[in-house]
Image (cartoon, rainbow, N blue to C red):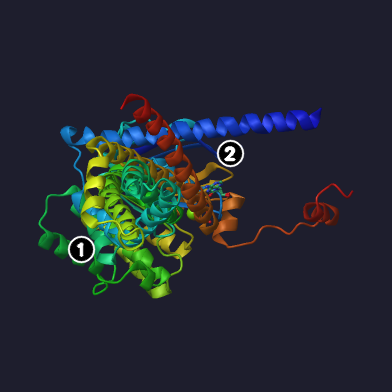
Amino acid sequence: MSEPIIQIKNLHSRYGTREILKGINLDVYKDETLVILGRSGCGKSTLLRHIIGLQKQSQGDIFVKGVNMARASDAERDEVLKKSGMLFQGAALFNSMTVGDNVALPLVEHTPLEPSTIEIMTRMKLELVGLSGFESFMPAQLSGGMKKRAALARALAMDPDILFCDEPSAGLDPIVAAGIDYLILKLKRAFKMTIMVVTHELASVFLIADRIALLDDGQVIFLGTREDMKNSSNPKIIQFLQRQPDEEVVDRELYLNSLIGTKYL
Amino acid sequence: MNAFWDTFGGAGRGMIDFAVHLYRIVHLSFRSLYWIFIGPFKGERIRWRLTFVQMVRIGVNSLPIVGVISFCVGLIIAMQAAYQLERFGATIYVADLVGVSITRELGPLITAIIIAGRSGSAITAEIGTMKVSEEIDALKTMGLNPIGYLVVPRTLAMIVVVPCLTVLADLFGIAGGFVLAIYNLKLPFLAYFNETATAILLKDFITGLIKSGFFAIIIAQIGVYQGFSVQGGAEGVGKSTTASVVSSIFLIIFADLLFTTLFYSTF
Ligand SMILES: Nc1ncnc2c1ncn2[C@@H]1O[C@H](COP(=O)(O)OP(=O)(O)OP(=O)(O)O)[C@@H](O)[C@H]1O
Ligand SMILES: [Mg+2]
């Protein structure tokens, strides 16, 4: 494969004293779609925040297109960011602006285009996510899934080289969710984007992923293609694929302890 | 003994926290002033449209309240002055007292306090809400600097609008004095007018405006700083909004003390 476009080297991340990421090593190659799996709260969103430089790591380095995101100057980082799009888990639309203005903002700020051109491009991006006609709506007037799609349109506004999606299809009905999956496939094929997706939908995973990374306890415990994953004998992966819950705690005393703490014993 | 160290340690921690806050606010202020005054020469553009929107929000919408309150304060000062001066039959000097105290002190101070309560808090609430809903992060990931996009327009709008409102407050405050002088003290209009005109020196007026410019910077910077430091959800926004008003009023009074001392001893 080609050069890695994103390189993550021994990334450690902590909130206070709680270490969330414990030495992540991961390369993402140009034009590939990498899906990140992992249980809720294992640090998937945190990983994306580190890659785009929103959070400073306690240890390790991240390079995006060769730029060290934690050490680069604002100008260098902004250049990388202008050509990448991020869909936040909570959409993060600007609530004081209409949907159209949200999508148009990066174009207005970063390009010398005429307002009429920007308007057309905005409509095209909204059309792409199935929201044509909603330009003048305020984010508060949209449903959760519509917000997600509007945010995706905004992330695509600058025709990014790298797209980060944090659970693009969470909270969408199966038909729209499938639509988002096909949109990602289309983007990948037609625009040659490098895409990093966090998702829990196993169906999507097998549809869109070139490679899959599974996070567990702050580390990448599996990295490979769909076939590698299906053939894996790792119990954690089998548990994930077969959607099995954690094993019940059988030791009654331990369970009791975990409920009331140890101070009464 | 433990209690002693607890109190001692608590006080120490409080001092350190205060110093850290102060350092960050000063740092933020320097960064914003750099963006405003030096940025344009280094290729950063100032967003005039956003600045204009903020000017309307802070300025135009505050006109009535600033006008009414300064008029009332002018009236109050005039009555208090008349109460003293009547004993000497020198009620004409109400003009001097009202004119000088309004332009030098009360006009700038009242305007700043009203704007801190009205617009400083609104800035904190708006930016705090944006922080909580990850909008600030979204701005950054678009390669837009929150200083240039959010802080500069608000600071610039404050620096323009607060001195303008102060001029208005001066006029309305003096008008309050006029009303008492003419309807209650029965002083002739022209005499009171001339007395006011000779009493207020240009420097009184100018020092008042200089102060109000600095108050404007304080209100904007505290408002923005408190907004950015919101933690948690809606409750965090509420806390920071309160802190924003309290700390900007405190700093305004403190800055006022410094400036007044300076102007009093040098001019
Ligand atoms: N601002 C914060 N302060 C303290 N801890 C945090 C903060 N944000 C996240 N965490 C912690 O970091 C861990 C990872 O959070 P993160 O949002 O990255 O999880 P996630 O893998 O994206 O989960 P999900 O699939 O539910 O979105 C969580 O255990 C959470 O408690
Ligand atoms: Mg997440």
Is the CB atom of the residue marked by disc 2 within 8 angstroms of ligand 1's nearest atom?
Answer: yes
Name the spot of residue A136 as percent of width and height, x first: 25, 71
Residue depicted at 55% across the width and 55% down the height: A40
Residue sitting nearer the eye, B234 or A5: B234
Residue ID at (21%, 57%): A190
Q: Which quadrant holds residue A146?
A: bottom left
Which is more N-terminal, label 2 or label 1?
2
Q: Which mark is residue A143?
A: none
Location of residue A258 with respect to B16 vertically, above or below: below
Quarter of the image where one finds residue A29 = top left
The image shows residue B201, relative to residue A95, as above or below, that is above
| B227 versus A79 height, above or below | below
In the picture, the disc for residue A16 is 2
Crowdedness near tag 1: few (<14), some (14–19) or many (≥20) residues, C-alpha within 10 Å = many
Q: What kind of residue is marked 1?
A: Thr
- Quarter of the figure that contains the N terminus of chain B: top right
In this rendering, does residue A147 appear at all?
A: yes
Mark 1 — on which chain does it sit?
A
Closer-to-camera residue (B118/B183): B183
Which residue sits furthest top? B266
- Callout 2: residue from which chain? A
Q: CA distance from mark 1 to mark 2?
A: 41 Å
For badge 2, the amino acid type reads Gly
Near mark 2 (Cα within 10 A), the count class, few <14, some 14-19 or many ≥20, is few
Q: Tell me the SS state at disc 2.
A: loop
Check disc 1 and report the residue beneath it.
A122
Element at badge 1? helix
Camera-side residue of B18 and A107: B18
Could you tell me which quadrant the C terminus of chain B lies in? top left
